[in-house]
């Protein structure tokens, strides 16, 4: 038995055939292109083979989990796009599971990143163009009644902060996403253009870049502290482009979370950077597929 | 079959015999007194009867759920007190389940407050001397790996705020607990002495009392917004002494949560005041007892 894992990103689609132990047996990736439905169809056709038992999809949001539809911000051609129905039509008879991309990242990290045995409650954070999150609680993905749990990028960390496109003010994303870090640094005279360069400059000690990472780490600290206090999480795993900053981000973050938290149980949270990188989402989509109720043995 | 529900508060202990439909068949309450262990023993002896299948306890914290010990802030005689062991010794052979008092309040509201059918995810908040919280997620109590999930009173809502005894700064509790509301109002010339009086004065339009409730509602809004965004909750139920303020608290809170939240799913959260009052904790303790794994039929 194998499953098909699909990762719907804003700029790329990836798919992989993954076995129950988490081995990737085949893998393909395509830029979204001008016709995302055609790209998806080609990707699925290339990955279709005997023995597939289910499909799991992690998609950029927003998505409507109950309806099986997605409206990824960076794919304007898809608005309320019936992703589950389309995929089920391409692979008749296979059950299809859908969750958010960051929810799949969290599940993938938990399953294949070495947390399954040591962690009962894990928060995954993807810091890139936006900031997404996913939760494993009591050893299971927790996606919420409407499928939207884990939106850590839109919790308010600075009530006096900037307006966020979501409609709220001072969301974590306004302070710590890649583009917002770059914008903040540029407004203070930094000459670079992207988060990767910002991280490189901070690592050489460039003061504005350093200050930007400190500010971002402070905002992430607030989000992690809140989640640890509310959910008693064992682990936080950070992925996405900004995670490439490595110890520059991780070291102050670990120190600040301990310093900010008062309660013992909220101080104990372990914070790590992803060890799986972009593959985490595919592993999570596969785990989602393997957990599909249709695959479980019928009780007698 | 019935269960024994026990509610360990800072000033009173209560116990009740509750049937599977949630009917209270017997009930007793005692002030903690100078010897809390003797009070507990007398209460349990008065409630012991044939047919008891399990015991559920909701206790003021902190508690160490795994060890079955409690250290309620207002009961100095109990530090790392082996509550589960002591109760099991008084009722030999009965399985004993322990959770936090606010966790039991949330579970009790969910079971007997009319939420079980309409809500998959519920946050219960107890606003009194402190601010506690409990979570029902995916229709089950979520207490976290160390038993401490739901500590909404200690999420930071004002990073520039007052230090909290927990060690953090600007916790929800520093702004919205009964005693902290009273202190804030007194510092601005209000002449009263407790939260009940503060609510009464606010209801007559006394400006400082009104401002105090607005400030408290604002802080609670931040906590509810954060929880709704992170956990996609359907319902928030508020209990505790401050809930007696009624519409004075509830109306601005409902408006503010919709105004503050950007994302649709975080705006849809329903906010209510407890309809069960102090009984919610006993119902929750009973539900905890009925859910004890030892009561489940052994699979063949």
Image: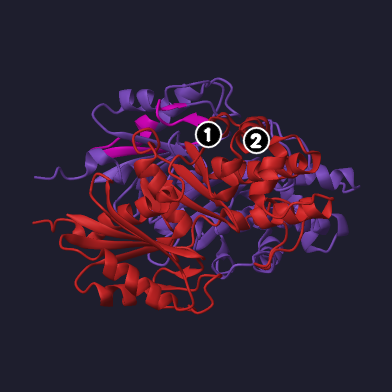
Chain colours: A purple, B red
User: Can you say whether B6 is above or below A38 in the image?
Assistant: below
Please give the residue where the numbered disc 1 appears in the rendered image.
B269
* Contact (Cβ within 8 Å) of mark 2 with mark 1: no
Please give the residue where the numbered disc 2 appears in the rendered image.
B248
| Residues at marks 2 and 1, CA–CA distance in whole angstroms | 19 Å
Residue situated furthest right in the rendering: A189
| Residue A129, percent from left and from top | 66, 40
Residue B35: within the magenta? no
**Of the pair B62 and A184, the residue shown nearer to us:** B62
* Residue A102: mark: none
Could you say which quadrant of the image residue B261 lies in? top right
Q: Which chain is indicated by disc 2?
A: B
Secondary structure at badge 1 equals: loop
Residue A61: within the magenta? yes
Q: Is residue A227 left or right of B160 when viewed as pictured? A: left
| Residue A52, percent from left and from top | 26, 39
Could you say which quadrant of the image residue B81 lies in? bottom left
Q: Is residue A179 left or right of B10 when viewed as pictured? A: right
Is any part of residue A98 visible from this angle? Answer: yes
Magenta-colored span = A44-69
> Are the residues flagged by discs 2 and 1 from a single subunit?
yes
Please rate how many residues cluster around mark 2, counting C-alpha atoms within 10 Å: few if below 14, some from 14 to 19, many from 20.
Answer: some
């Amino acid at each position: 038995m194998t499953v098909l894992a699909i990762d719907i990103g804003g700029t790329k689609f990836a798919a992989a055939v993954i076995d129950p132990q988490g081995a990737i047996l085949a893998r393909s990736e395509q830029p979204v292109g001008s016709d995302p439905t055609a790209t998806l169809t080609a990707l699925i056709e290339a990955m279709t083979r005997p023995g597939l038992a289910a499909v799991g999809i992690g998609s950029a949001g927003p998505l409507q989990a109950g309806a099986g539809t997605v409206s990824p911000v960076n794919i304007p051609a898809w608005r309320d796009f019936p992703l589950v129905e389309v995929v089920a039509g391409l692979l008749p008879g296979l059950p299809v599971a859908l969750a958010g991309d960051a929810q799949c990242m969290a599940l993938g990290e938990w399953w294949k990143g070495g947390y399954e045995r040591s962690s009962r409650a894990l928060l995954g954070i993807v810091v890139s163009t936006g900031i997404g999150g996913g939760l494993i609680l009591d050893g299971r993905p927790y996606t919420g009644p409407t499928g939207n749990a884990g939106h850590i990028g839109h919790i308010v960390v600075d009530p006096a902060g900037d307006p966020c496109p979501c409609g709220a003010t001072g969301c974590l994303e306004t302070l710590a996403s890649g583009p917002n870090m770059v914008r903040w640094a540029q407004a203070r005279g930094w000459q670079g253009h992207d988060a990767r360069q910002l991280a490189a400059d901070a690592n050489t000690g460039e003061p504005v870049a350093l200050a930007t990472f400190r500010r971002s780490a402070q905002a992430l600290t607030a989000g992690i502290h809140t989640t640890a206090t509310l959910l008693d999480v064992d682990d936080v795993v950070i992925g996405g482009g900004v995670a490439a900053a490595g110890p520059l981000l991780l070291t102050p973050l670990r120190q600040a979370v301990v310093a900010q938290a008062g309660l013992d149980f909220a101080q104990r949270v372990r914070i790590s950077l992803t060890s799986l990188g972009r593959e985490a989402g595919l592993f999570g989509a596969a785990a989602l597929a393997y957990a599909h109720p249709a695959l479980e043995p019928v009780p007698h």
